[in-house]
Amino acid sequence: MAKIDINDVYLEYDSGSGRQAALDGVSFSVGEGEFVSVIGSSGCGKSTLLGLLAGLMPPSGGEILIDGDRVTGTGKDRSVVFQHYSLFPWMSARGNIVFALKQQGRNGCKPSALREKADRYLGLVGLADAARKFPRELSGGMQQRVAIARALALDSPMLLMDEPFGAIDAKNRAGLQELLLDLWDCGDGRKTVVFVTHDIDEAIFLSDKIVVMSSGPGRVKEEIPVPFPRPREREGIVRTAAYAALRNRIVLLFYDDLAKAIGGEEVVI
């Protein structure tokens, strides 16, 4: 049995001029400990799908199962990194993480232990000196790193990430990708990760499988396994013919979607 089963999921919303479909019959599964990236053009429903997985809203049709149980709301088994930081502005970077740990049910832990854990994860994302700083004192990229540290500190078995590195500069982005893989692949078992991104190279480097979404409304266009063994060495795989072929295949899927949107002919892949 898969860890996550997404079965014929629809989502409609009221656009003001009638009902509009955001997702149209989306189905795929995510195995235990699998790292799956969802990619697609803007407006294809990637973030909406992640919100459904997080239990923030119900689908209009179909169902999402986790360990065979239907998702009906949020749960402590899922940590979420949103696009827009979602930090409490009146709490320090450390305070935001400590608060999340308490909400997870760790009120019985000593305050010093919670602070130490928060500081450890802030250090891992390169923010060891920012523990006492408030969000207004941090750049957008630094705030996003605090949000990533918070999600990782919760150590939930499932990690849902919505373009978590989008606001981060290239150098720190590469380092955080490596960190994410290190933390995903340590301990007794790998976490199950659903990772939304628009970056094809990021998706290939991180993922076991890539789900390509089509736009207007969102559907699964193709599920593509990533063939490179782990651990992956970035410089090694990007120079291979297999990497170029996989990347070109995904680019063509994007181009085909764009060509249809502007009235062109479908690209044969």
Image (spheres, grey):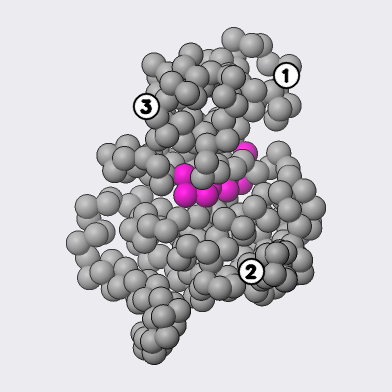
Q: In this view, does 184 lie to the left or right of 233?
A: right
Q: Name the residue under label 1.
A: 107
User: What's the CA distance linking mark 3 and mark 2?
Assistant: 37 Å
Residue 134 lies, in percent from the top left, at 50, 19
Of the two numbered discs 2 and 1 in the rendering, the one whose residue sits closer to the viewer: 2
Q: Which residue lies furthest to the front in this view?
A: 17
Q: Which of 263 and 114 is in front in this view?
A: 263
Residue 170: where, in percent of width, then height? 29, 43
Residue 255 or residue 8, whichever sits in front: 255
User: Nearer the observer, disc 1 or disc 3?
Assistant: 3
Looking at the image, can residue 42 be seen?
yes
Q: On screen, 245 above or below 64?
A: below
Q: Earlier in the sequence, mark 3 or mark 2?
A: 2
Residue depicted at 71% across the width and 27% down the height: 103
Q: What residue did someone put label 2 on?
A: 23
Sort mark 2 into few (<14), some (14-19) or many (20+) by Cα contacts within 10 Å: many
The stretch of residues the image draws in magenta is 156-164
Q: Residues within 10 Å of mark 1 (few under 14, many from 20)?
A: few
Residue ID at (32%, 52%): 232
Which quadrant, please, contains the C terminus? Answer: bottom left
Which labelled disc corresponds to residue 193? none
Q: Is mark 2 on a helix, strand or loop?
A: strand
Q: What residue type is labelled 1?
A: Asn
Q: Which residue is drawn at 27% across and 51% down?
A: 234
> Magenta includes 61?
no
Q: How far apart are marks 2 and 1 (CA)?
A: 39 Å
Checking the image for residue 126, the label placed there is: 3
Q: Mark 1 and mark 3: span between their CA atoms?
A: 27 Å
The furthest residue to the left: 239
Amino acid carrying mark 3 in the image? Gly
- Name the side, left or right, on which 150 lies relative to 103: left
Label 1 SS: loop
